[in-house]
Image (spheres, grey):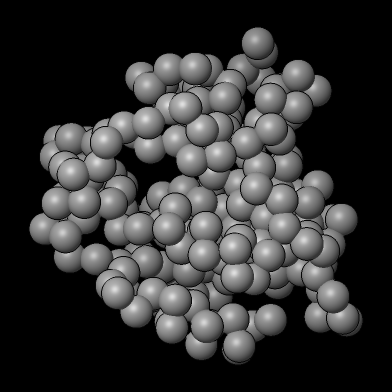
Amino acid sequence: MSMISVNDKALLKADETVLRGQKARGRTGPVLFILMGLPGVGKSRVARALHDTYRFTVLSGENITHALFRTKNCRGSQYAFAYKVLRKLAADYLRRRFSVVVDGTNLRLQYRRMLYRLATQARARPYLLEIRAADRVALARLKSQVPSYADSHAIRSSCSRRTFDVFKQQLQRPLPSEPTLRLVSNNKVKDQLREICLKVL
């Protein structure tokens, strides 16, 4: 598989992992939620709630990476390729008026900017949804999480403290210019999502 260009085979494999929602109604057009947060903060839980309750289409970086490479130990170039595929799928779904949630860490500004651009090109409204939890909470969740690769729509991998710390070093907080909404990962996530969706949908 070429690491330079995205081919149809890669797109088809990745598309099999997508949780499809419904097309946006009305004149406001589709919404792109870009989830941002460290491992263990509950991003996939939020993505699933956006799908189940608000019919968003979910593109998961972890699911797509596993579908393409079938390994839990990917190289940097493989992750870069997987996210290139993810962005192509996101652009396609947004153009077809599906509201999309990108489930990934999205810690680096340069990658968030790529997603903002493709949303603008598709006439979608982008929002960065920053999800936070205390480090001890995130690490406890990661420790208790059982890795699972059986369901291509819900891959759960492990993350060591060392890997968590590497992710934390990559964290670039949202700039004032970024369209940022914030959510605290606790037992009131659904209530917080309801308030957020009332504002933007």
Left or right side of 186 for 148: right
- What quarter of the picture does the N terminus occupy? top right
Left or right side of 59 for 194: left
Left or right side of 160 for 15: right
The foreground one among 161 and 50 is 50
Q: Position of residue 107 (x, y in %)?
A: 39, 53
Q: Position of residue 5 (x, y in %)?
A: 72, 22
- What quarter of the picture does the C terminus occupy? bottom right
The answer to whether residue 95 is visible is yes
| Up/down of 177 relative to 69, above or below | below
| Up/down of 198 relative to 32, above or below | below
Residue depicted at 85% across the width and 75% down the height:
25
Residue depicted at 87% across the width and 81% down the height:
26
Residue depicted at 52% across the width and 83% down the height:
194
Query: As drawn, which residue projects farthest toward the top?
Result: 1
Q: Position of residue 92 (x, y in %)?
A: 81, 47
The answer to whether residue 117 is visible is no
The foreground one among 63 and 110 is 63
Q: Quadrant of residue 64?
A: top right
Residue depicted at 30% across the width and 58% down the height:
41
| Up/down of 127 relative to 106, above or below | below
Query: How many numbered callouts?
Result: 0
| Up/down of 86 relative to 99, above or below | above
